[in-house]
Image: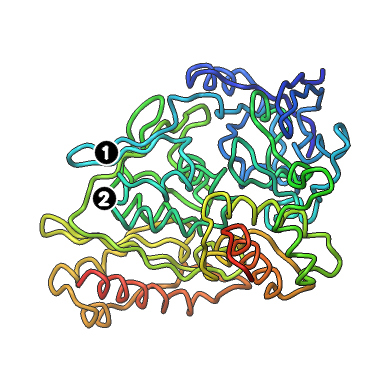
Amino acid sequence: MYKFNYVKADSVDAAAAAVSGSEDGKILAGGMTLLPTMKQRLAAPSDLVDLGGIDALKGIEVSGDSVTIGAMTTHATVAASADVAGAIPALTELASGIGDPQVRNRGTIGGSVANSDPSADYPAAVVALGATVVTNKREIAGDDFFLDIFETALEEDEIITAVRFPIPEKAAYIKFPNPASRYAVVGVFVCTGGGDVRVGVTGAGPCAFRATGIEDALKADFSAAAVDGVTVDGSEFNEDMHASAEFRTSLVSVGAKRAVAALS
Amino acid sequence: MSKIHVSTTVNGDPVEFLCEPQQTLLDVLRDELQLTGSKEGCASGDCGACSIELDGRLVCSCLVLGAEAEGRDVETVESIAVGDTLHPVQAKILEHGALQCGYCTPGFVVAAKALLDRNPDPTETEVRYWLAGNLCRCTGYDKIVGAVLDAASEMRGETS
């Protein structure tokens, strides 16, 4: 790692001020991506502003129609939450499938969402469930949050404080994990409620997105066969050593069909 | 840049140290506190050789900054044996020959103990799922999993 200043913030306002006042400051949440990236010298922030001491950013609140998860809540906490399991069991399942125990004990929902890794799990749930990303400045709709690979609607000194998920009637998350990292080669999150069907996809494109063609087909006929009739456009999909774009295109359909089967 | 003063608890003892911002907790344990049981393997959170417990949570110490340990409770592999008496996980790893080069072993010991502290009667699947963050390139895992299941059985008071 290159040298940097370490700042431990005791409030979100102090953290935002520390980032604004620095040359090229970055927020440290769980550090599961940022620290390896800095070790590889792919990132060299002037300052690292640690949110780990801000208790207000940790915790889970379930109300009648939503689940609100504090930005610094770890994946392990979400995975073990009986409240989340009672409201949106697909979300606990998603959290329990992230990485390995060491990663789940440090990695946070705010960090995962803010990073917009194309293979991260939470973004699929954020777009599918129509979640709201709450920051220190405003509330951002899940549909407007992920812009591109590692790019979100967040401004430089904007800090996620919580993610609020509406509770759907039913939801299922199907992931094809990389067998080594458990990152999603493709992950498909399907939810239903109020006559609507929403399908969020991660791993396939530059960032998480909704598969609107599959949504329309499932609204007309909620069956695996309906997904077969939809042609997924994989022309912009990721190609890497783990999977070709063609394979990822196929996995989007297969994942959607398995999710529908799980919900039927 | 001045060093950061950190007060923490390591293996039950109050410990103070000075560290650079870019020193990881693993760097501090090994280079400042001479606790060299935790190993650096990948240095990127994949291999688990640096596993420790931080406030009772299994984590990779290579992805925790030394400065982040302020006020926290750190338990390393050095705390697991009591004097010359090995923890059952350690004894069973020896008995099963569940290591070759031994570099990953401290991480497996910490991770396996953390599992058995929470779940005294895990299934083989649960053991494999829990140890997913610890890599071993020698054994092929079967002997490690067998040793952990055997240790669990012994700790429950069953004869093996």
Left or right of A94, for residue A27:
right
**SS type, badge 2:** helix
Amino acid carrying mark 2 in the image: Gly
The residue sitting at 79% across, 50% down in the picture is B85
Name the one closer to the observer, B89 or A2: B89
Left or right of B121, for residue A191:
left
In this figure, which residue is indicated by the disc labeled 1?
A: A62
Name the one closer to the observer, B90 or A209: B90
* Label drawn at residue B149: none
Amino acid carrying mark 1 in the image: Val
For marks 1 and 2 on the same chain, the one whose residue lies earlier in the sequence: 1
Q: Position of residue B136 (x, y in %)?
A: 74, 67
In terms of image quadrants, where is residue A244? Answer: bottom right
Q: Position of residue B113 (x, y in %)?
A: 64, 52
Task: Please determine whether, in this image, residue A7 is positioned above or below residue B140.
Answer: above
Residues under numbered marks 1 and 2 in contact, where contact means CB atoms less than 8 Å apart: yes
The residue sitting at 73% across, 54% down in the picture is B107
Task: Please determine whether, in this image, residue A49 is positioned above or below residue A14.
Answer: below
**SS type, badge 1:** strand
| Labels 1, 2: front one | 2
The residue sitting at 77% across, 59% down in the picture is B105
In this figure, which residue is indicated by the disc labeled 2?
A: A86
